[in-house]
Structures are given as structure tokens and as C-alpha cells.
Image (cartoon, grey):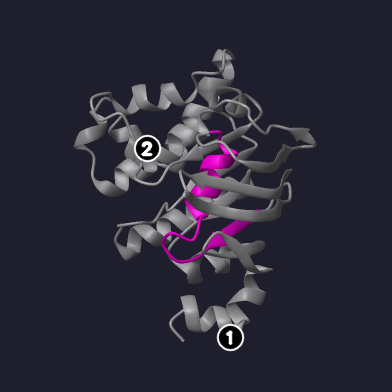
Amino acid sequence: MLEIRDLHVYYGAIHALKGISLDVPEGAIVTLIGANGAGKTSTLRAIAGLIKNKHGHILSNGQDITGFNPVDIVKTGIVMSPEGRKIFAHLSVLENLYLGAYSRNDKAGIARDLEWVFELFPRLSERRVQKGGTLSGGEQQMLAVGRALMSAPKLVMLDEPSLGLAPLLVKEVFRIIHMINAKGMTVLLVEQNAYAALKVAHQAYVLETGSIILSGTGAELIADERVRKAYLGG
């Protein structure tokens, strides 16, 4: 579904991504793990068109989307739920969700997906008229993911969805990731909880200072001694 080839990204003089290549197969959960500053978020932002690559190519279903603007990338079926949630604090839950569907005009489909989001996140249904900024951290994360799903994506990118959440809510986040994937959506996941991320992943990559140093199935990387020492606490 998604192919990245020799991708280089710079922030001024800082070489953030140093020629990474990776594949995201259709229907899979693919995880990127690595320390802070390794380039995980930069990879997602480059795919989403939020930063421009200096060199390399990004292909979606064989179409070269390198250089597309973010609106057109959403229209190809790729959407991102950003780190830090970035919800609209002064808008209601319902208004935030409808903004996720801004590129769509299929009213019946939007209504159907809204009900699906409320099935995934019953708390959002209960809070539908409440301002986004008054929600708890966990509820805001639900809203950020729900807003992304309202674009009817083929590939949803989740950037640190469990960051700052209590352990019970972290379990809920990964249950939702399973459910999203079971509905047929491809998931590209960046997650600081490396063990949970690898456990759910079909395919995984380890980023270190802007380069991919390891790849394999989630199970293979959990069993890899280098990954265990560096990211799994043993």
C-alpha cells in the first residue's frame, strides 16, 4: 500500500531522515520504534505532506505522492492522528469529528462512519456536545483518533496514541487499534511503548538517528537481543 524509498528529510542543517526505505503492506499493522529524536514522527509528517523531503520517493498504491500537499494526501486515503492530539479545544466533540470528514461529500457514508466512531468510543457519544478542551487526556486521544477515522482512510497513521495515558487506557488504545485493523484499515503506528507496539505489529522497523537499523515481524524484534536491551528493558 505504501512504499518509501531513500527518503531524506532536513530541518535546516539537521539531517533528520537519512535515506530510509520501508514498506507498509495493505491490511497490516506496521510499527516504528526508536528513541526520542530517532525520526519516527518526521517519517509520518513526511508521508502526510507536512514536511517536504529533500530526496527520495513516497508511493501510495503505486502512485508517487512525493510533494503532494496535505489535503491531496488525505484524498488519497492517508490520514494522520498527530502526537499531542491537536484537537480543536473550543469546538464540540461532534464538530471536531465532522472536521475530520471535511474532504468528503457522501452524507450517508459520513453518518455511517460517525456511528462507527461512537461504537468504538462510547464516551465520545456521551460527550458529543461538550467542548473538546474540557475532555480528559484519554477522551481527547479518543477524539483525535476518531477525527482521523472520519476521513474514511485506507491508511491511518497514529503518532504516540498511548502517550501520557494511564495503563488501563493504554490497553484500550491497543484494543481499538486491533478493531480498526480488523475493519480492513492499514495502520502505521509510532509508539513509545515499544513492547505493546511490537506485540500488535505484523511488521516493524527500528529507527536510530534517522536511519533504519533493524526490521522484521513484531515477534522477531521482541525476541531480538539488541531490541530487548535497548527498548524493552532487558
Q: Position of residue 153 (x, y in %)?
A: 60, 33
Residue for point 46% across, 87% down: 234
Viewer-proximal residue among 167 and 41: 41
Distance, label 2 to label 1, CA atoms, is 37 Å
- Going by the numbered disc 2, the residue's amino acid type is Leu
Q: Is residue 70 above or below residue 25?
A: above
For label 2, the residue is 143
Q: Are marks 2 and 1 in contact (CB under 8 Å)?
A: no
Q: Would you say residue 40 sits in the magenta stretch?
A: yes
Residue for point 65% across, 48% down: 7
What segment carries the magenta color?
29-49
Viewer-proximal residue among 204 and 117: 204
At label 1, counting other C-alpha atoms closer than 10 Å, the crowd grade (few under 14, some 14-19, many 20 or more) is few
* SS at badge 1: helix
For label 1, the residue is 225
Q: Is residue 128 above or below residue 168?
A: above
- Going by the numbered disc 1, the residue's amino acid type is Glu
Residue for point 58% across, 77% down: 222
